[in-house]
Amino acid sequence: MLSKTVRRLGIVVLSAVLFTTLAVSLFADASKFSASKDAREKDEPQKFLPDYDKLIEGKKADWVYFPEGVKLKSFKTVVLKDFTVTGHAKESKGAAEYGVEYLAQWIEKSDLGWSIEKKAGDIVIEGNVFNAWEPSDAAAFWGGGLGADPTVGVELIGRDKSGKILFEVRHKRKGSTMPDAVENALDNIVATLEKGK
């Protein structure tokens, strides 16, 4: 009688352990970019960052990767490269033209303590617009919906002088105009860099 009870209790405990392990595994995967809906978007290329599989959900920015042990505030100078474009929409190129200006603005307002240099710096930041969308005439006419505001998708990668990756970020943001969307995206990204998550 006791052995049947012990066996049943063992089965219940084993089932609970397996269920918990499965739930934790599914939850952990759900927080990875590679398991997200964003990763399956056909019009949002994944051609710029080297480690899309390492991106996880961020706090302010959508997707982030910070290698363990990196302390961004320990760096003093930064060089900002012109943004590239992997998005095919015609708005992507126009959005990329605002990248360096707004990134510099938010870095200067941040508490990162970085001085922006032209040629050489402790960090080199490269940016990319993976897509940009203007509202369609129909969405503007009907006053809302998903396409009612300009939206931009921005990626940043930061490397030290040796080329070691310090961070990768991928983020989409809306704005009242395309420049406003770029500014909003980079505001969120710099806030993410300040927090390191």
Image (tube, rainbow, N blue to C red):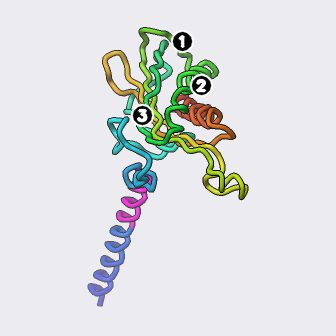
Foreground pick, 1 / 22: 22
Q: Magenta span covers which residues?
A: 20-32
Asked whether disc 1 touches disc 2, contact meaning CB atoms under 8 Å apart, the reply is no
Q: Which residue is mark 1?
A: 115
Residue 102: image tag: 2
SS at mark 3?
Answer: strand
* 39 relative to 106 in the view: left or right: left
Measure the C-alpha gap from mark 1 to mark 3. 20 Å
Alpha carbon separation for disc pair 1 and 2: 15 Å
Tag 2 or tag 1, which sits nearer the N-term? Answer: 2
Q: Residues within 10 Å of mark 3 (few under 14, many from 20)?
A: many
Q: Amino acid at mark 2?
A: Tyr
**Three-letter amino acid code at the position of disc 1:** Ser
Q: Residue at x 36, y 59 (%)?
A: 25
Residue visible at 54% across and 31% down in the picture = 94
**In which quadrant of the rendered view does residue 69 lie?**
top left
Of 136 and 101, which appears nearest the observer? 136
| Residue 172 sits in quarter | top right
Residue to which mark 3 is pinned: 168
Could you tell me which residue is drawn at 62 percent across and 43 percent down? 150
Q: Identify the residue shown where x is 51% and y is 30%.
A: 96
Q: Is residue 53 covered in magenta?
A: no
Tell me the mark number nearer the camera, choosing from 1 and 2.
2
For label 1, the SS is: strand
Q: Earlier in the sequence, mark 1 or mark 3?
A: 1
Which of labels 3 and 2 is toward the front? 2
Placement of the N terminus among the 4 image quadrants: bottom left
User: Looking at the picture, does residue 147 appear above or below residue 105?
Assistant: below
